[in-house]
Amino acid sequence: MIPRGLTVAGSDSGGGAGIQADLKTMLALGVHGMSVITAVTAQNSLGVQGAWELPVQAVRAQYRSVVDDIGVQAVKTGMLASAELVEAVAELISGTDAPAVVDPVGVSKHGDPLLAASALDSVRTKLLPAATVATPNLDEVAQLTGVHVESEDDLRRAAAAVLEYGPRWALIKGGHLPGDARRAGGNEAVDLLTDGSAEYWLRAPRHDNRHTHGTGCTLASAVASGLAKGLTVPEAVTAAKEYVTGAIAAGFALGAGIGPVDHGWRFRN
């Protein structure tokens, strides 16, 4: 049977991030994608104009409908706006025999808040402990742990702080490191994957392309796709890094603002 992945996240009406990005990624990577929608957003290349959270009972019903009948090999979480939703989804994925990739979405690419401040403690104490892999970017690390990453050396400190909350692996995304904080002479996007013992430093060329909407969602759902296909966590993350690097390089203009990464770049190449 084809591998099956489930995304639990918000809908992006512009198609660049959220549920739409997750499903495109899964399709591109040979996984049957299914969805539990947690929120509906009015969103385009300029930002998020509105967001409406779904009731917890609707989220639970979607999840049980899919998992109890079709089954899943991996689950990925994204936008969970409230403490009530965070705690419900944490309970659901904890009771599912499948690896879980938690993307602790805090703000959109345009800086719009997507997580209530009151939900942060629930992310720390309920959601992260249920994660096989947590994939925060540097802003999310600071929001969750108070650790501010200013150099590559700080990525270890950030990972340790995230692992304190209980995920088996932390993937700290260093794409937001400023130029003067990167390794001397390098122009790379560097991420650190670790379980507190083994370390994997993932480096890729940094592409000069502003059209990067959906990068975080795409990476997390690519990791989940690899896990659904039976890869180990390091194998899944390595493959996901390669995929998202190509998607960023091929990102395209759409609307008047920041366009999306290209989830179908391999097909066009």
Image (cartoon, rainbow, N blue to C red):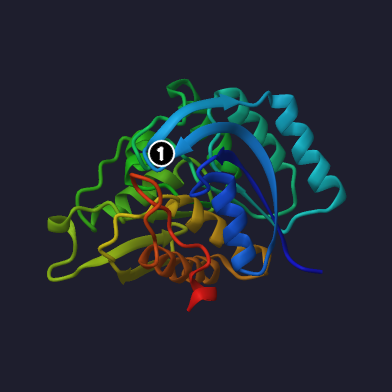
Circle 1: residue type: Ser
Q: Nearer the viewer, residue 14 or 113?
A: 14
Q: Position of residue 159 (x, y in %)?
A: 38, 51
Q: Nearer the viewer, residue 13 or 102?
A: 13
The number of discs equals 1
Q: Position of residue 156 (x, y in %)?
A: 32, 55
Direction bottom: furthest residue: 269
| Picture quadrant of residue 29 | bottom right
Residue at 33 percent across and 41 percent down: it is 139
Element type where label 1 sits in the image = loop
Residue at 55 percent across and 61 percent down: it is 222
Q: Is residue 177 left or right of residue 69?
A: left
Q: Position of residue 183 (x, y in %)?
A: 18, 66
Q: Nearer the viewer, residue 55 or 129?
A: 55
Q: Is residue 158 left or right of residue 51?
A: left
Residue at 45 percent across and 50 percent down: it is 214
Direction top: furthest residue: 118
Q: Position of residue 8 (x, y in %)?
A: 63, 42
Q: Nearer the viewer, residue 80 or 45?
A: 45
Residue at 31 percent across and 56 percent down: it is 175
Tell me the quadrant of the picture where the N terminus can be found.
bottom right
**Above/below status of 195 relative to 115:** below
| Picture quadrant of residue 228 | bottom right
* Residues packed near mark 1 inside 10 Å, few (<14), some (14 to 19) or many (20 plus): some
Direction front: furthest residue: 255
Q: Is residue 74 left or right of residue 169?
A: right
The residue that disc 1 covers is 108
